Amino acid sequence: SVDEKEEEDLESEVEAATSLEGDQDNARSEILEFLGKMPPFDFQAVCAKLVSALGHEVVWISPPGPDGGLDFVAYADPIGASGRRIKGQAKRQQSKQDVNDVGAFTSKLKGDDVGVFIALGGFTKNALADSFSNEQRLILLDGADLINLWIENYGQLDEEARDLLALKPVWRL
C-alpha cells in the first residue's frame, strides 16, 4: 500500500541521516584525537595556518620551547600597518581551560590587541563567562570550532597547512 511505502521511505531516510550523523561524529572524534597527539609545535602551526586562511598575515610563530604564553602573532595586512594585532594561544590538551588559563593569556593582550585562544578541550563555563565580560577582545575556540573552521576554509589553506592536517571529503547520498 501507499502508506507502507511512505513509511518505509521515511524509515530509510531516518536511518541514512542517523548513519551520516554517526559517521560525521566519528570523523570529528578521529580528527580531534589526531590533533591531540600532534607535536605541540605542529598544533600551534595548524592554529596559525587557520588564522592565515581566515585572511590574516601571520608574522610570528613561537619556536619550540617555552613561549611565554604566546604561540603566534598575526596582523590584518602583510606589514601590520592597519587593523588590530592578533595574538594567539594554542592548547592541544583535552582538559578544559579554566579562568586562570584564560586570564594568563588575556594578560598578554595590550591596547587594542585581539586574542584568539584555541583549546581542543574547550573552556569551563566560568572561563567562557569571564571572556565575555572582559574588556579585551577575546575569541575562544574549542576543538569543534577549529575543525569546522578548518573544513569551511580548506580551500584557503596553503600546502603546508594541508600537509599538517590533510582532510579528505566523503560524499554520500
Image (cartoon, rainbow, N blue to C red):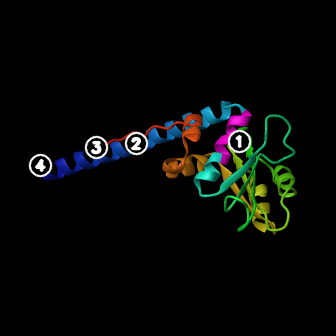
Distance Cα–Cα, label 4 vs label 1: 59 Å
Three-letter amino acid code at disc 1? Gln
The number of callouts visible is 4
Distance Cα–Cα, label 4 vs label 3: 17 Å
Query: Which is more N-terminal, label 1 or label 4?
Result: 4
Distance Cα–Cα, label 2 vs label 1: 31 Å
Asked if disc 2 and disc 3 are in contact, CB closer than 8 Å, the reply is no
Distance Cα–Cα, label 1 vs label 3: 43 Å
- For the point 77% across and 45% down, the residue is 71
- For the point 81% across and 48% down, the residue is 70
Mark 4: few/some/many CA within 10 Å (<14, 14-19, 20+): few
Three-letter amino acid code at disc 3? Ser
Three-letter amino acid code at disc 4? Ser
Determine the secondary structure under disc 4.
loop
Residue occupying the far front of the picture: 79
Q: Main secondary structure of the magenta part?
A: helix
Looking at this view, is 74 or 99 the one in front?
A: 74
Q: Is residue 150 magenta?
A: no
Name the quadrant of the C terminus: top left
Asked if disc 4 and disc 1 are in contact, CB closer than 8 Å, the reply is no
Asked if disc 1 and disc 3 are in contact, CB closer than 8 Å, the reply is no
Which residue does the numbered mark 4 point to in the structure image?
Answer: 1
Which residue does the numbered mark 2 point to in the structure image?
Answer: 20
Which residue does the numbered mark 3 point to in the structure image?
Answer: 12
Query: Which is more N-terminal, label 4 or label 2?
Result: 4
Which portion, as a residue range, is magenta? 40-48
Residue 58, x across and y down, in percent: 69, 51
Which residue does the numbered mark 1 point to in the structure image?
Answer: 44
Query: Which is more N-terminal, label 1 or label 2?
Result: 2
Determine the secondary structure under disc 1.
helix
